[in-house]
Image (cartoon, helix red, strand yellow):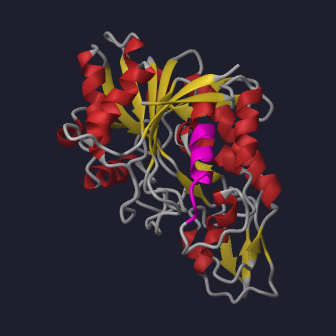
Amino acid sequence: MESKVFYTSLKLNKNENLLDKLEKLVKKAGIETLNFQNKFVAIKIHFGEPGNLAYLRPNYSRRIVEIIKRCGGKVFLTDCNTLYIGRRKNGLDHLEAAYENGYNPFQTGCQIIIADGIKGLNQEEVPINLEYIEKAKIGKALYDADIIISMNHFKGHELAGFGGVLKNLGMGGASRAGKAEIHSSGKPFIDEKLCHACGGCRKVCAQEAITLNPKAQIDYDLCLGCGRCISACRIDAIKTDWQESSAKMNRKVAEYAYAVLKDKEHFHISFVIDVSPYCDCDSRNDIPIIGDVGFLASFDPVALDQACMDLVNSMPLNNVYQKHQEDNFKSLHPHSFGEAGLEHAEKIGLGVRNYRLIEI
């Protein structure tokens, strides 16, 4: 079997703009075949951590909102709260951050709803009984929606390898408790011989699981395994079993994405632009790893992620980064196992990796 993935480059004709190209793409891919009439439609998107400028511009979401409204849908934009220290850890700060980045009702044409509420406790447990997850804890607003549309910024990720549809839905759609479950695959440890006791890891730990005594120490009863301390350590004194943590996390992400989409109609749009090496959750973004590729859309989330990854790997890596492998993401994050998520998503029936790319 193969799924259809529709693609358009960013090259314009004289009488169109990028928003016109986006609308043409999603219509060709079949978004209007969904029965939106009087249905609650959740557009799952990442509002961007303030300071990061690689997140998707709200103009794109407004065009999709307009299409859904014309089809009679009751549409809203949504995301769940985060685990780590930042501007999106609770619903009120999250909304302020979204508004600051242009995601407000005046700009997008629809309401912004934080799916798991003010404190990240507004969740629904979805029984899926898969290999890793028995009941997935997802944001209540996503659960209550009739139709899910994902708008995905395709980019790198320190632990997952890359982020696309599966990451946006699986990790992004999980409540704070769900995120903790996903991240608990492998917990870091500290090499005391290397540790300088600078306290950088302690500052980024949202769970206050790290103390200095005199070197850094981790309280594993508090640690969630999110990996933020690993990124914060400039001398690589904090380590983990990367294969265990990255591969397992990606498989759990796939199962959570399955839970978000379970028994719902869905459609997916990915933007392979400003492909930063890090997630939009980071309050900074680095120079893109490749040049802009274009927009893609499909009913199959697995095929779409696979197509995006293949397109990224077909492009030359920006010469400021050192190329080590055929996989551009592996060059940046050699200990990541992004393919594990795609393999598992196909295994559990979320979609197929085999696709036909249709350029419009």
Q: Say whether residue 307 is magenta.
A: yes
Residue 235's quadrant in the figure? bottom right
Residue 4's quadrant in the figure? top right
- Determine the residue positioned at 54% across, 36% down: 169
**Extreme-front residue of the structure:** 14
- Determine the residue positioned at 60% across, 74% down: 232
- Determine the residue positioned at 32% across, 37% down: 61
* Residue 359 image offset from top left, x and y in percent: 47, 32
Q: Nearer the viewer, residue 123 or 65?
A: 65
Q: Is residue 28 above or below residue 292?
A: above
Q: Nearer the viewer, residue 347 or 74?
A: 347
The quadrant in which the C terminus is found is top left
* Residue 211 image offset from top left, x and y in percent: 67, 76
The quadrant in which the N terminus is found is top right
User: Over which residues does the magenta segment extend?
Assistant: 305-317
- Would you say residue 145 is visible in this rendering? no
* Residue 205 image offset from top left, x and y in percent: 59, 67
